[in-house]
Amino acid sequence: MENKMTYEEALGELQQLVAVIEAPDAHIAGIGKELKRAMELLEFCRKELDGYEKEFDTILNKEQI
């Protein structure tokens, strides 16, 4: 069974990857793996936020009835 990552965990890992990618001694040839993982995490975070937005919209629309 796969252990689903939380939004907060994904964001934390993404922040760590950004620090590695932006490091002054980072070489473009050596950060491909980090860039790929960062893109995966960004997609995950976007999907999570979209889900929360839909959930909040549903709650707010019910409150207006």
Image (tube, rainbow, N blue to C red):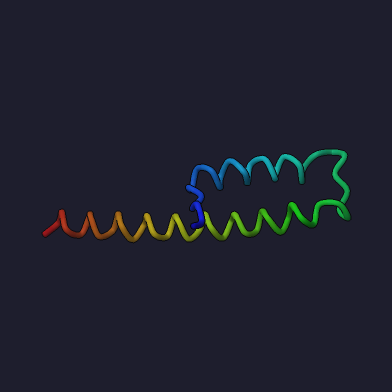
Residue 1 % position (x, y):
49, 57
**Residue 5 or 2: which is nearer the viewer?**
2
From this viewpoint, which residue is outermost toward the front? 1
**Residue 37 or 50: which is nearer the viewer?**
37
Residue 2 % position (x, y):
51, 56
Residue at 45%, 56% in the rendered image = 48
Left of 17 or right of it: where is 55?
A: left
Q: Quadrant of residue 58?
A: bottom left
**Residue 65 or 16: which is nearer the viewer?**
16
Residue at 73%, 55% in the rendered image = 35
From this viewpoint, which residue is outermost toward the left? 65
Residue at 67%, 40% in the rendered image = 16
Residue 41 % position (x, y):
60, 54
Residue 42 % position (x, y):
59, 56
Instruction: Say how many tags the image has.
Output: 0
Q: Quadrant of the C terminus?
A: bottom left
Residue at 53%, 58% in the rendered image = 44
**Residue 14 or 4: which is nearer the viewer?**
4
Left of 24 or right of it: where is 41?
A: left
**11 lies above or below 57:** above
